[in-house]
Structure formats: structure tokens, C-alpha cells
Amino acid sequence: MSTTAPARLMAGEQLLGHPKGLFVCFLTEMWERFAFYGMKALLLLYLTKHHLFADADGYLLLGTYAGLAYALPLLGGILADRWIGMRKAVIYGGILLVLGQLGMAWTGHAAEGVQGQAVQDAGAIQIMYFSLALIGVGVGFLKPNISTIVGRLYPEADPRRDSGFTIFYMGINVGAFLSSLIVGYVGINYGWGWGFGLSGVMMALGLVQFVLGQAEPPASHSARAEWLIYAAGVGLTFVVWQVLQTRIDFGPLSALVGGHEVTLTELVAVVLGIGLYAWFIGLLLSGISAAEKGRMVMLMVLITVSALFWGLYEQTYGPWVALADRAMDLTTFGITWNAAQTTAIGALAVISLSPVFAWLWPRLDKRGLNPSYPAKFAWGLVFCGLAFAVLAYATANPAADTGLVSLWWMILAYFVLVMGEMVLSPVGLSAVTSLSIPRAVGMMMGAWFLFSAFGEIIAGRLGTWAAIPPEASREMALATYTSVFTSMMWIGLAAGGLLFLATPLLKRLTREG
């Protein structure tokens, strides 16, 4: 596909100081994330309350499903770069997402019995797995390519790039905020299926908006190759359907993950990771310049580190939701939230802080004070650790009269966590398009999401630490959460400190200092 100036459609047309195409992508991603996060806000509660999955199984499915959804963009980026173009990849991915979200609306009958040992509606569970597979493959086609389109709207070395990605990132979180409140409310109060179905309808609206907005021009490719890829996407959905449900006992390897069987999703992610590193080594040996090698090495280090951040961050959709459901006073200012709606707090924090960081980076840059990419990532990990410190303290000190944790502690924890997110996630997207050599930018954007996948899988495994048996008392639950959150605090702080120590070396690789 051509990557020359005409590909930057709307790059010369400005709106609020940025290319107009940024706002087309903003709205598309806003509705896609509305669908994705609305479903995700309900998923753990749906699994453990409707189908009566055991806690550990719910956390693992949450992690492995989201892991596949973020691993598949590695493939989606390659297919878009070489064959179908970014615009068609986004449209195809959007169609699969709509079908998957609507499929989740079929919930069957509720399980009967004790959590973890119940009689379940096997047909409804298979429809759920297939719907999750559709969503995962859809994300694989859509997610890396819409982000790459945003990067291509800006000329190289454009100082607005970081701000543009921060604005784009705010669109993601407007969708996440609205979905957590609306889908969370509808799903809990009117039925799981109504919440999932609403997510599908809004995804369809986002897809229509993207087609009409045309942030990226159509690319010319072989029609035969294009249809073969579409057919392969459908076939891949059937493969993912089975992968999501498959676990393997590898003996000693299973012992490393607490005696649990290793999921096939985890094995797929490991194989993809090994393949990515092999490709990367080949790229470094392909004759690129020393400066290009330095930038690519820094980028790969940052991408790898991001997996740990997301492994901690994604506890917000697992143990944080479980804490809110089981041991939190959810009433504030006379308004009572439900557990799914608490996930909106993180999105609200991003929306609140995005303008601050969009304003901050260019001004720090003018004064020569803008932190390097590695330093920003280190701060991200430190803030992540501090967020868990807030919740560890809160669960160890519940209100004396009710024995519940105040919602205000979770609000504080979210805002601290999002401080870390804002210095890592939108900056990471910008780093991919800024540091990568042009011929590898699609692949590296896919790599960014692959390591987000590792983060999701890590999150699923870490989440099992917080699994609580159905008969557990509230005091036992709080004690478990305190122990788990304290461990996660130390993981975040230690990783951030090590990355601060490595920052000077990484900067020398790119000859920044």
C-alpha cells in the first residue's frame, strides 16, 4: 500500500490545530471502545453470577480472551500492511465486532447450583465462546490499523504527534466511560443480554461513522487476495473459538502457574512472542543503520516492559470489580453504583487528565524538560504500584461501622493509576510511530498490542491470586485483597525503579544523551 503523502488524507485540513482525520478516528475508536469495554465491564460478573464460573476460572477467561484480542493485532497489522490496506482492515474488523457483541446478547438460562460446580447451559456457553472469538478477531483487524492511521496523519518529527495520540486516547476513554455507566446499568438492571446487545448497536454506529468519514483513502489490492483474507478471518474465528476453551496439563510448567492447567491461549501468545523476537533479530541484521537499530531496540524494550504494566492495570476488570461487588460501599452523594459501573471511574480519570497531559508535553519539550520515553514508562510503573498501595491500605482498614471499603478509596486509586496510564499508554502508541522504521511500523504496532496481550494474560494469572471460595466471609475476602494488592504494589514500584536505572543506557542507544 502506498505510504506517500496522498495517504495522509486530511493531513492538510486542520481542526483545533490537528488534522481532521484525527477526529474521524477519535469517534470510530470511541464507539468501538464503548462496545468492547461495556462488554468487558460486565464479563466477570456475568461469568460468576449467571453461569456460576468459579472465581479463578472467571479471571482466567477474562485474561485469556482479552489476551487473544490483543495478540491478534500482530497478524492484523501484517495483513493490512501487505494486502488489504488499513481502511479495509478496520471495516472488516468492525463487522466482526458487531456480530460478536450481538452474539453475546444470547445468554441462555442461568446456571443452577453452587458457584464452580453448577449445572450450566452448555449451548449458551458455546455461543458465548464463539462471540468472544468474533470480538477477538475483529479487534485484531481493527485495533492496530486505526492507531497507525492516526500516526500517518502527522509528518515526521511533528511535535503535535504526542498530543494527537493523547486526544485520540481520550476518545477511547469517552467510549469506555459511557459504556461502563450505560452498559453496566442496563446489563445489571435489565438483563445481561440487553447490555451486550447495546454494545453491538453502538459498535455498528461507530463503523458507519468511519466509512462515511474516510480518515484513510481506499487502497488498491488484488480482489482475490482480499477475499481470501476475509475468508481466512472467518476460519480463524472458528480456531479461536476452540482455543479459548482449551487447557493443557504440562506438568512442571503447570506447577509454575499455581497448579493450574496452561491455557492454549497462553501457548499461542508465547509462540507469537518467540516469532516476533526472531523477526526482530532478523530486522536488526537486515542492513538498517546504527541509529535505526538503536531506536528499534529502545522501542522493543518499551513494548516488552508494557506487558507488566498492563498485567497490573487490568486487575481493574478482575479483582477491583470483585472487591466492589463483595466488600465496598457503592453509595456516594446519594447515588448507588453497581460494581460494573465502577470501571467508569478509570475512564473518567483519563478524560479529566488527557487535556492536562496534551497541554503538558509540548510545553515541557519547549523547555527541554520532556522526559524520554523510558523515563515516562518508568513513571507509569511507579504510579501503578502506588495505586495498589491505596487499595491495600483501604482493604486493610474498612469502615468500622459497616466493615465495607469506601468508594472514595477506589476513586483515588483509579486517579493514581491513570496518572501512570497517561505517561505510558498514549505515549507508547506515539513511540511506535515515531521510533519505528517506516517499513516496520505496522508490525511494531501489532507488537505493541501483542505485549498488551501478554499483559492481559498476566492479569488473568495474577487475578487468580484473589480467587475467593463462595463460602468466604467478607473479612476473609478483605484479607485476601489486602495481601494481593500489597504484592502488586511492590511489583509495580520495583519494576519502575529498575527502568529508571536503565533509562540512561536506553537513551544512549538512540544518541539522545
Image (cartoon, helix red, strand yellow):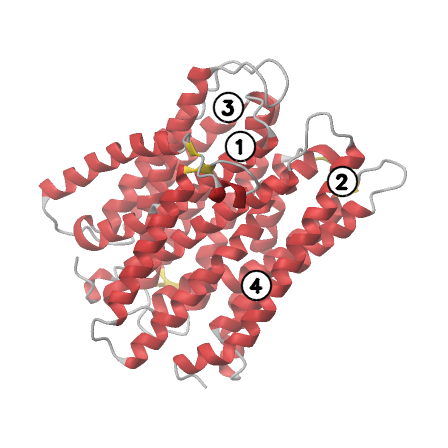
Please determine whether, in this image, residue 298 is positioned above or below residue 384: below
Whether the residues at callouts 1 and 3 have beta carbons within 8 Å, the answer is no
Of badges 1 and 3, nearer the viewer stands: 1
Of badges 4 and 2, nearer the viewer stands: 2
Residue at which label 1 appears: 43
Q: Amino acid at mark 1?
A: Leu
Q: Earlier in the sequence, mark 2 or mark 3?
A: 3
Residue at which label 2 appears: 478
Tag 2: Cα neighbours inside 10 Å, few (<14), some, or many (≥20)? many
226 to the left or right of 259: left
Q: Amino acid at mark 2?
A: Leu
Q: Quadrant of residue 228?
A: top left
Judged from this view, the residue extending furthest toward the front is 252
Q: Amino acid at mark 3?
A: Trp
Residue name at image x 80 percent, y 38 percent = 404
Q: Is residue 408 visible?
A: yes
Q: From mark 4 to mark 3, how far is it between C-alphas? A: 36 Å
414 to the left or right of 424: right
Judged from this view, the residue extending furthest toward the bottom is 513
Of badges 2 and 3, nearer the viewer stands: 2
Residue name at image x 56 percent, y 73 percent = 500
Q: Which mark is residue 380?
A: 4
Whether the residues at callouts 2 and 1 have beta carbons within 8 Å, the answer is no
Q: Quadrant of residue 335?
A: top right
Residue at which label 3 appears: 194
Whether the residues at callouts 4 and 3 have beta carbons within 8 Å, the answer is no
3 to the left or right of 63: left
